[in-house]
Image (cartoon, rainbow, N blue to C red):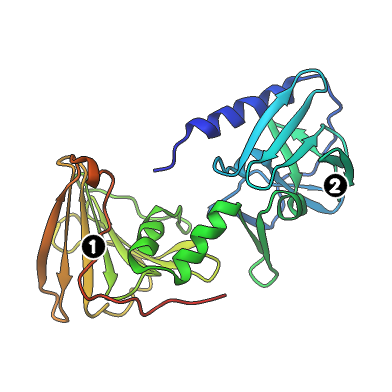
Amino acid sequence: MRKCYPFLISAFLLSVLVVAPTTIFAAAPATSLNVYMNGKQQEEVLLLQGRTLVPLRAFDDPARLSYTYDANSKTVKITNKVNNVSIQLSGGAQEAMINGKKVKLDAQVTFKGGRTFVPLRFLSENLGGSVSYDKVGNKVVVRTPSEQERFKTLMSGDLTEARKIAISLPIIYGKDALQPQGEGFSIKYTFPKGETLRYYEQYKGLINYVEINADGLAEVKWQGDDPQSNIGHREKGNKPADLGEAVYFMDSVMSDYTYYGTIDKLGKSTELGQLDRSKENNKGKVIVPINEEKRIDARTK
């Protein structure tokens, strides 16, 4: 789970700047372009001067970036702690001060609805973010520097580490997604043997089939009620083919245990072990290595 304290500090500091006296420039409502920042779709996106602007505070990377507010100049100061770059932004300005030098932006810094919006290009060119455009899918995918490193691990890195990242990604549901109707506090993740980029998630009697696309976005492709739960027979989407040999990880939230094992081609489960997460060296562990399992779905982009 991400630590939210640095994020809240950044949000507070940016909100202080919003209420300071400044010129507010009109901007168009959210565009039809789908913008994803660190895997999460942004509902607050502006179109200004033909450019797409996104909320600055959504570009959250506490390990690399810090935000402070200068009351005298009424500016947001952004510090990249890795490369010692200092950036200052002022509301309504179409330029930024980067290490004391003026750099022109392709759209004005805009305050709207308690948010500070900056051009997408600013994130990639000045904050070290990754921005990719998909004209066919009408979407933009933005990642912070730290998230870009996680993305590389997710797509082609160590199997266990990649799976940890996979289950932590924000899940993108389609329209009218099914909601769980059962009870319980356990979450079961099932991956095909040697794979990371697709899995089943089972919670409160509802099963989600999730695929992670080439942009690192986790999309639900199918949902259905667990036939063994006697809750219902709802189904949505196209059910995937059988996974074949698989591995599972059961996150028992109430008992603070992780149970893990294998599933053969016939669907028979074999528990390999359990992890007491109350012990210091096991805290937060849900995904663990499975002996002799090797990754087979690594991809490079």
Residue 37 in view, yes or no: no
167 sits left or right of 300 in the view: left
Residue 233 is marked as: 1
Looking at the image, which residue is at 26% across and 43% down?
283
Percent coordinates x, y for residue 226 in the rendering: 20, 61
137 sits left or right of 108 in the view: left
The answer to whether mark 1 and mark 2 are in CB contact below 8 A is: no
- Reply above or below: 181 against 12: below
Residue type beneath disc 1: His
For numbered disc 1, what is the local secondary structure? loop
Q: Quadrant of the N terminus?
A: top left
Residue 71 in view, yes or no: yes
Looking at the image, which residue is at 38% across and 68% down?
158
Question: Which residue is identified by label 2?
Answer: 107
Looking at the image, which residue is at 69% across and 58% down?
33
In the image, 171 versus 84, the foreground residue is: 84
152 sits left or right of 266 in the view: right
